Amino acid sequence: MTKSNESGWNFDNSYTKLPEFFYSNTNPTSVRSPEMVKFNETFAKSLGLTAEALQSEEATAIFAGNDIPLGASPIAQAYAGHQFGHFTMLGDGRAILLGEHITPTGERYDIQLKGPGRTPYSRGGDGRAALGPMLREYIISEAMHALGIPTTRSLAVVSTGQPVIRETNLPGAILTRVASSHIRVGTFQYAAKWGSVEDTRALADYTITRHYSEINDHEDKYLSFLKAVINRQAKLISQWQLVGFIHGVMNTDNMTISGETIDYGPCAFMDTYDPETVFSSIDARGRYAYGNQPGIGGWNLARFAETLLDLLHDNDEEAVKIAQDAISEYPELSRGYWLEGMRAKLGIFNVEEQDETLINDLLNVMKQYKADYTNTFRALTREAHEESVLQGTLEFNDWYKRWQERLSRQEQSKEAALDLMRKSNPSIIPRNHRVEEALDAAQEDDYSVMNKLLEALANPYDYTSVQEEYCKLPDSTGLPYRTYCGT
Ligand code: AMP
Ligand code: MG
């Protein structure tokens, strides 16, 4: 165990005060020759960590799981989940929570190693992760953060010097993931299925204190909790929709109670607008297609509500009714957040009943002409219509006229509308071909491509030449882009 604390770590381990049923004490398995390949200096500083000290050999040993920082008490967390609709026991099979770091301003963050070796929940797996997917998570999670979307973040990636065996041998790596917590819908499902009512209550009380402390003294505390989680998830998934993010594997174990995006496996950003877009190689039926995400969010939240039934009312029927009433609010909440965001993307400040039709008509034209999602809104924002494939089509011309009329009916000036659009329409997203290009170079030990991409992605709402370069679409290969899970 490292004695010195000059790195600024300030660990607490509140999760280990829950009943032991919720976790297993587990240490990472040492790796041969760890090397820091990516370190998030800005983020480290914002956590109150000493960036310089964290780039030392001792720090690398910590990020590799070869050493445990002072005050940390490593555990693997237990959880269950519905994977593609099927309920199963899961748990941290390839992740270990070192503990919770408390920042100088009192914020609490989970510090988790992803890929640190086997745990009691590993089942047949090796508990390891490959370099490519860990760097991919780093890029996309940091891009999501910069887009203003709640997400787990990435502090460091170390290569292990050991291969992981997948279809071929791949270089191994460990990602340090930082989250406001790793409590999932699946954590509650685990408690409800295999624990006592008191276990579920302990988890709920803990989670409320950690993420929703404002409702701690509510009379119907658990109902307020359920509603608050529904609200945060409705908002989160709407934010995904607004930027064209496809999570790819919205299993209930991959849905946080904090309302942060988690588990960057087969996720990717949509290019051509089509609600049926799926990138994941394992989602043959399109369960987690772009257009299905809000609905799946509702389905997952219903599974969450079921885990709270014993806490909602002593009478089973009453409890079900309370839960159903809360869940029934989700579609309208979700639609409301989406509409609000879509209005902003079109520079609309006030509310008119016909707005939803106006928005959907644009989306339909985009679908018809296979328009790029991000670049269509970017072109509208820059008033650079010649850049859009929609330019000159009858349908778009008609829509454009209605949109201009709509803008003229609001008090705000055209300038104010364009300003709102710039703040609401990212000019850059992590485009699949650019992410792949960065990962390919990194595999050859050249991190310059990835660093340059990350720099551009850090300011997604800027409209400068830096972003411009990343707006270009790939040359068509004729092959659909495919993403892979859990590798
Ligand atoms: P994920 O696809 O990351 O949501 O993982 C689903 C489940 O499989 C979780 O319980 C993971 O911990 C587990 N898992 C994924 N990859 C591995 C691995 N290489 N070794 C052990 N468990 C794994
Ligand atoms: Mg997962």
Image (cartoon, helix red, strand yellow):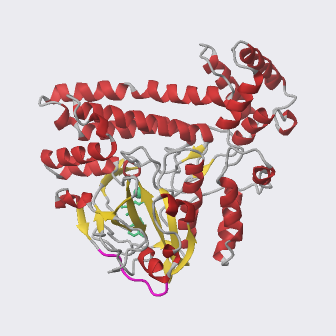
Side of 334 relative to 446 (left or right)? left
Region in magenta: 27-34
Residue 125 position, x and y percent, is 38, 71
Q: Could you say which quadrant of the image residue 168 lies in? A: bottom right
Q: Is residue 459 above or below residue 312?
A: below
Q: Is residue 69 above or below residue 344?
A: below
Please state which of residues 111 and 310 is positioned toward the viewer in this rendering: 111
Q: Is residue 82 above or below residue 163?
A: above
Q: Main secondary structure of the magenta part?
A: loop
| Number of disc labels | 0
Residue 148 position, x and y percent, is 56, 44
Residue 166 visible to the viewer: no
Q: Could you say which quadrant of the image residue 313 lies in? A: top left
Residue at image location 44% in from the left, 77% down from the top: 64
Q: Is residue 277 above or below residue 128?
A: above
Asked if the stretch drawn in magenta spans residue 423, the answer is no
| Ligand number 2: quarter of image | bottom left
Residue at image location 32% in from the left, 50% down from the top: 186
Residue 357 position, x and y percent, is 64, 19
Side of 128 relative to 211 (left or right)? right
Residue 376 visible to the viewer: yes
